[in-house]
Image: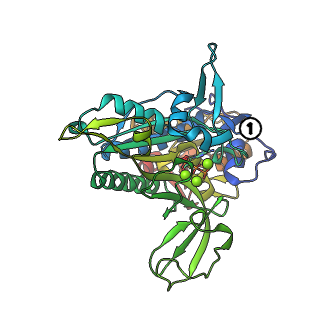
Amino acid sequence: MRQSQLFATTLREEPADAELASHRLLLKAGYIRQLAGGIYTYMPLGWRVLQKIESIVNEEMDRAGAQRLLMPALQPLELWQASGRERDYGPELIRLRDRHDREFALGPTHEEVIASLVGNELQSYRRFPVTLYQIQTKFRDERRPRYGLLRGREFLMKDAYSFDTDREGLDRSYQRMYEAYERIFTRCGLDYRAVEADAGAIGGDGGSHEFVALSESGEDTIASCSACGYAANVELSDVSHTATGDACPRCMEGGLQLCKGIEVGHVFKLGTKYTEALGALYLDANGRERASLMGCYGIGISRLMAAVLEQHHDASGMVWPAAVAPYAVHIVIVAIQDARQRECAERLYEQLRAHGIDVLLDDRDERAGVKFRDADLLGLPHRIVAGKHAQAGSVEYVAHSSGIREVLTIEEAAARVV
Ligand code: ATP
Ligand code: MG
Ligand code: MG
Ligand code: MG
């Protein structure tokens, strides 16, 4: 991609009302734009990061045996009345009426829709188990949408649902998703902990875990014990009373450590709560009607992009882990009028693209200072500068995360990133 054509405007001023690094940097570097409170456009750079995250999620869901589908965002309110969740969700549920006065909700999550779907499709025990997932826009009328993509009213979620005919099956499906989550967050470059969690408005009786990205800016607090490995979101206990040094409620020996984090994923064993409420029944081997056992598994895809940034930035901008960076390489032409610089940069650009590498070429007619400032802000993993060494056919290579600089020939520079 040529930066002269890229639909991205970097801001000179610090964006107002952006308290957290991820929110400030995403706005400043032109990755997102706000339309209304908690509602954002993902600009081309932001969308590329989301797609990188999605492809990691797709690969790991596929490896775990989950099948992708796409359900409607618009859901008849009767489904929510049938499960009893219309009341539990309260004002967070966005409701609307069609021209015939029928009531709908904009899906904040899809347990009801999928339970009724699977109930209709799978009527024999022979068809189980199955795990399905989607990546979709979700709607929640959050009381306080804030921190940019961390708490939106419209946001991207990956939601998966498993259906089994017995407890052991549910345990296996849950374990497979749990392990897929570990791989997803590790691949995204996140420092995270899996902790025991409260099931909240989703409900269910079988336990749940949250995946929490460690960050001082997080809204969640986790308590962990180094003696026995216990770790939980303090929502689970009496929040106001848990403190660092308290005895561990599991082993009673270790002292609890508290730290802050961002909930990026959540897995639940739901049991039959939704399948019973929605009459999603199948016939077992003896011809008896039974409700299947359900699990559900969410990842906030757009929140994850912001959480990665909370952990990966420096004083001048973003520092993207390679796996989720919008482009792998940033080639910067220092002076666009210089034919040798242009030539070196173009040769490298074509070579790298021929190897299938995502390259951003800064071919703008801007001052060098502006270009370097923007490159620091955009934070791509590899930077190659076509500048004063271009006369001798060389470029400067900089690994963004370490800051190490080397003067290399074009071939050597290409070899660093291929
Ligand atoms: P929170 O406690 O932060 O409100 P939640 O527990 O209500 O989140 P879940 O119902 O567990 O969220 O949804 C699954 C995932 O969706 C969450 O783990 C989170 O990553 C993401 N998510 C939830 N609410 C939002 C939001 N308002 N904006 C962005 N992502 C969200
Ligand atoms: Mg919530
Ligand atoms: Mg939560
Ligand atoms: Mg949750």
Along the viewing direction, whichever of 381 and 17 lies nearer the viewer? 17
Q: Please state if 173 lies on the left or on the right of 109 as rendered.
A: left
Along the viewing direction, whichever of 52 and 85 lies nearer the viewer? 85
Q: Position of residue 22 (x, y in %)?
A: 66, 50
Write down the quadrant of residue 104 in the picture. Answer: top right
Residue 337 appears in the figure: no
Residue at 57% of width from left, 78% of height from top?
256
Visual colour scheme:
rainbow
Write down the quadrant of residue 13 in the picture. Answer: top right
Residue at 62% of width from left, 31% of height from top?
6
Kind of residue at badge 1: Gly
Whether ligand 1 has any atom under 8 Å from the Cβ at mark 1 is answered as: no
Q: Please state if 114 lies on the left or on the right of 321 as rendered.
A: left
Q: Which secondary structure, mark 1?
A: loop
- Give the crowd class for mark 1: few <14, some 14-19, many >=20 residues within 10 Å: few
Q: Furthest residue to the bottom?
A: 253
Along the viewing direction, whichever of 257 and 324 lies nearer the viewer? 257
Along the viewing direction, whichever of 394 and 206 lies nearer the viewer? 206
Residue 48 appears in the figure: yes
Residue at 53% of width from left, 79% of height from top?
248
How many numbered discs sit on the rendered protein? 1
Q: Please state if 66 lies on the left or on the right of 381 as rendered.
A: left
Q: Furthest residue to the top?
A: 99
Quadrant where the N terminus is found in the figure: top right
Q: Position of residue 209 (x, y in %)?
A: 47, 58
Residue at 44% of width from left, 58% of height from top?
207
Residue at image mark 1: 37
